[in-house]
Image: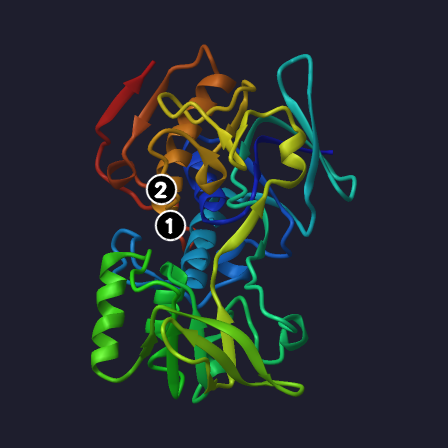
Amino acid sequence: MITTDILIIGAGPTGLFTIFEAGLLKLKCHLIDALPQPGGQCSEIYPKKPIYDIPAYPEILAGDLTDKLIEQTKQFEPGFTLGERAETIDKQDDGTFIVTTNKGTKHHAKIVAIAGGLGSFEPRKPKIESLEKFEDNGVEYIIKEPEFYRDKKVVISGGGDSALDWAIFLSDVASEVTLIHRRNEFRGALDSVEKVQELKNLGKITMITPAEVKGIVGEDKVTGVVVEKKGEEPFTLETDHFIPLFGLSPKLGPIANWGLEIEKNAIKVNNALDYQTNIPGIYAIGDVNTYPGKLKLILCGFHEATLMCQSAYKRIFPDKKYVMKYTTVGGVEGFDGTKKEAPKAVVKAID
């Protein structure tokens, strides 16, 4: 049986950053993730997608972000159970937990932190006849490697951040990028909408709105799509790839059966205190949780992880006084394995 202080379910950015915050408190972490490698969606689904709202990084690729988070955690030597899904949880008489995976691996922990992101998921697919026939033959729901589209004609359908961000990114990769949305208004960030409009004016992106893709053209591979634009006759647009980006349909999976309070496929937490669920000792952080004013941003997950670790420390050591040292003054282990010395720390006692 694997024993740890904090068992983190989910090895995405929020789960990885939790290792660092727990490590500063001398708490050991072990992570469970159904994917074969750490990084969550950032590594598995869109490693080459640029992210713009990480402090100090005007732009960073999702895969690079997870690489840096993993590098940051190495000094605390976390454990990983990868390629396995957390299946059941049993609370012990002493308030600790035993979590068992679908492969029978047991984990004993004082604290459980659910950082499962959107949970298990699958792409939302448009209702187009014979769509499945062309999957991986010109129809892709996820962009993993942008170079795959080098000098190709690409049609992107959707009106959210993913559609906008990839249209912007691929405008410098593909030979042609066409963005199709069923409305004139987009749901994405205003800055991205303005950037797409700018690229359209420069002739680097073709935008067709309000319109929808209603059919696929081709024998064994996509050669075009049938587009219906409001007020006009349907027409065929030649393309090499059709990428419908309508988001993901999330599912909590087995976690939904753990007795946690669920609201709209997310776990309710007490954000006024520490992001604890209705079961003492079980926390939910990142995109998997919900509370009034919740924002599903990686940045918010980092904040929630920090407060959760402080609460976990107090729960594990209720009679111990913790003195918080600012890492900028107290120093932490360097990423090269050396100790970063610093002047005497300014400390703040936390009861």
Q: In which quarter of the image is the N terminus?
A: top right
Give the answer, above or below, for where 49 lies relative to 344: below
Reading the image, the residue beneath label 1 is 334
Give the numbered dot on residue 116: none
Identify which amino acid the numbered label 2 is placed on: Val
| Disc 1 to disc 2, C-alpha distance | 6 Å
Percent x, y for residue 295?
35, 40
Q: Which residue is drawn at 49% across and 43% down?
A: 15
Q: Residues within 10 Å of mark 2 (few under 14, many from 20)?
A: some
Q: Is residue 235 left or right of residue 192?
A: right
Indicate whether 101 appears above or below 204.
above
Residue 32's image quarter? top right
Applied colour scheme: rainbow
* Residue depicted at x 63% and y 71%: 129
Residue 276 image offset from top left, x and y in percent: 47, 24
Residue situated furthest top in the rendering: 319
10 Å crowding of disc 1: few (<14), some (14-19), many (20+): few
- The answer to whether one can see residue 39 in this image is no
| Observer-nearest of 19 and 11 | 11
**Disc sitting over residue 332 in the figure:** 2
| Residue furthest right in the image | 104
Residue 58 place in picture, x, y as percent: 25, 61
User: In which quadrant of the rendered image does the C terminus lie?
Assistant: top left
Is there CB contact under 8 Å for labels 1 and 2?
yes
Query: Considering the numbered disc 2 on the image, is that residue within a helix, a strand or a loop?
Result: loop
The quarter of the displayed image where residue 155 is located: bottom left
Spot occupied by residue 113 in the image (x, y as percentages of width and height) = 53, 32
Mark count? 2
